[in-house]
């Protein structure tokens, strides 16, 4: 695993010192620079683009989101926001942040963020090279494996990998996300969830159900020309009649 070249951006010297100390124990990263302002960060990234930036959200003159806005999207490094302000989390993931660390965070939480950065960068590089990342099977979906969804559930902000979601179920003004680890009920419409997850990995099978394509095990014909979608966890969902023409797409071209 190649070391990630890391830039630290925070207007508080003590915050940079602590982060640098924590990262010193991570053999897979190398801190190559530090900036105390957003403007300095923009200049540093343009002059010598790092692989990863730990970016504070609120800084005098130019905040973290403004830093990213000044950089061409295709040339932005991977970004982990490290901030004391929880309220910006949704904005952070809207600009495709790898992770969002709330200060004070511990070494274990930092290690999770660094691991996610490695996965994100590997997937992006693989997509740019037109191949699957090392250890992955199949190139087309590789670039979508690290898509994230930030949802509000029970007053919490929950950060999910799209691959953690088996299927989503509409429930009035809510959506129930069925995960391998349990369920989350979020106050959001199915249409909004579907738009945020995208069509690359998810497929609507009926008005109330959206499933992860990799979780589809079988398409089972019924007695009257209808079909049911069987998921790998045993869930069976009816397939809407108007979606029958999309059987090939749902089955990944194998139906």
Image (cartoon, grey):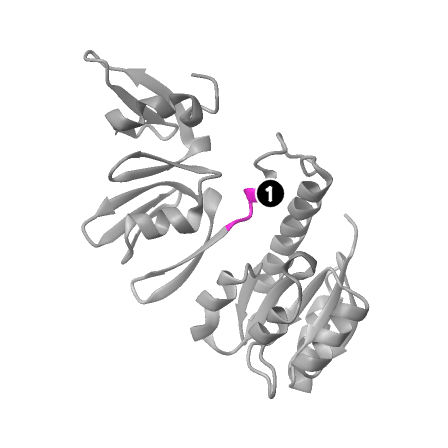
- Residue lying at the far bottom in this picture: please name it: 60
Q: Which span is picked out in magenta?
A: 143-147
- Above or below: residue 148 compared with residue 249: below
> Which residue lies under the disc numbered 1?
143
Q: Secondary structure at mark 1?
A: helix
Q: Is residue 75 left or right of residue 96?
A: right
Sort mark 1 into few (<14), some (14-19) or many (20+) by Cα contacts within 10 Å.
many
At 34% from the left and 52% from the top, the residue drawn is: 192
The quarter holding residue 15 reads: bottom right
Please tell me whether the stretch drawn in magenta is mainly helix, strand or loop: loop
The quarter holding residue 186 reads: bottom left
Residue 40, image x, y percentages? 73, 80
Q: Is residue 81 left or right of residue 207?
A: right
- Above or below: residue 207 compared with residue 121: above
Q: Is residue 233 left or right of residue 91?
A: left
227 in the magenta segment: no
Image quarter where the C terminus lies is: top left
At 69% from the left and 41% from the top, the residue drawn is: 126
At 60% from the left and 65% from the top, the residue drawn is: 80
Which one is in front, 119 or 110?
119
Residue 199, image x, y percentages? 44, 40
- Above or below: residue 188 compared with residue 208: below
At 54% from the left and 62% from the top, the residue drawn is: 95
Residue 41, image x, y percentages? 71, 76
Which one is in front, 124 or 181?
124
Residue 159, image x, y percentages? 45, 58
Q: Is residue 82 left or right of residue 88?
A: right
The quarter holding residue 220 reads: top left
């Amino acid at each position: 695993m190649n070391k990630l070249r890391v830039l630290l951006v925070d207007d508080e010297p003590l915050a940079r010192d602590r982060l640098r100390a924590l990262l010193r124990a991570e053999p897979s990263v190398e801190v190559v620079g530090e900036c105390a302002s957003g403007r300095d960060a923009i200049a540093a990234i343009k002059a010598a683009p790092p692989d990863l930036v730990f970016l504070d959200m609120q800084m005098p003159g130019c905040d973290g989101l403004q830093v990213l806005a000044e950089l061409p999207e295709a040339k932005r490094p991977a970004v982990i926001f490290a901030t004391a302000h929880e309220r910006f989390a949704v904005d952070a993931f809207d600009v495709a942040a790898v992770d969002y660390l709330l200060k004070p965070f511990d070494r274990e939480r930092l290690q999770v963020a660094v691991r996610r950065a490695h996965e994100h960068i590997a997937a992006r590089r693989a997509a740019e090279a037109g191949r699957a990342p090392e250890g992955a099977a199949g190139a087309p979906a590789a670039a979508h494996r690290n898509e994230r969804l930030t949802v509000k559930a029970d007053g919490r902000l929950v950060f999910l990998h799209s691959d953690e979601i088996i299927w989503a179920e509409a429930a009035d003004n809510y959506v129930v996300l069925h995960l391998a680890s349990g369920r989350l009920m979020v106050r959001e419409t199915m249409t909004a969830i579907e738009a945020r997850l995208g069509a690359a990995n998810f497929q609507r099978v009926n008005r109330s159900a959206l499933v992860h394509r990799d979780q589809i095990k079988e398409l089972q014909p019924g007695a009257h020309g209808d079909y049911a979608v069987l998921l790998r966890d045993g869930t069976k969902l009816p397939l809407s009649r108007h979606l029958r023409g999309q059987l090939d797409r749902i089955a990944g071209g194998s139906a």
